[in-house]
Image: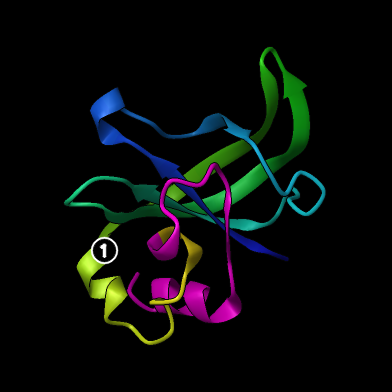
Amino acid sequence: MAHWLFQHNPARGHCGDGDWTIRRYRDRIAAGDEVALWHSGPAGGVVAMGAIVSDPHEIPGGTAVGLRFDRWHGISRAELRFDTRFRDALILRMPAGGNPFPLEPGHWRALAERL
């Protein structure tokens, strides 16, 4: 099982369960993987955790996976930046990258322990 982080800009409106477009890692992501939702912006951070509920599939305009979020909780970017297990996460180093962002086991533990 892999762990992923999906980023959303809350200025674009509400987000949640459903199909999410993916731009990379199509061959590594699968139903059953665990997922975190990251809100971008100055007050950003992880706002939810859940699971990937469908394998990559084609939709008009690209490839998507189904996501379901079942744990909603805020963990600020500042808090995660100071966690030695998370501070090297790709979302902090290259936040302009496309979805999804891979998370290493230590990154995931840093999130899961806070929920």
Residue at point 33%, 74% (across, down): 114
Image height of 8 relative to 77, above or below: above
Quadrant for residue 88, please give it.
bottom left
Residue at point 55%, 43% (across, down): 99
What is the x, y in percent for residue 73? 28, 57
Q: Is residue 31 left or right of residue 4?
A: right
Name which residue type carries label 1.
Arg
Query: Magenta span has 108?
Result: yes
The residue nearer to you, when weighing 52 against 21, is 21
What is the x, y in percent for residue 33? 67, 57
Residue at point 24%, 45% (across, down): 41
Residue to which mark 1 is pinned: 77
Image height of 107 relative to 29, above or below: below
Q: Quadrant of the N terminus?
A: bottom right
Q: Is residue 57 left or right of residue 113?
A: right
Query: Magenta span has 50?
Result: no
Q: Quadrant of the C terminus?
A: bottom left
Magenta range: 92-115
Q: Is residue 109 left or right of residue 38?
A: right
Residue at point 42%, 64% (across, down): 93
Asked whether the viewer can see residue 13, the reply is no
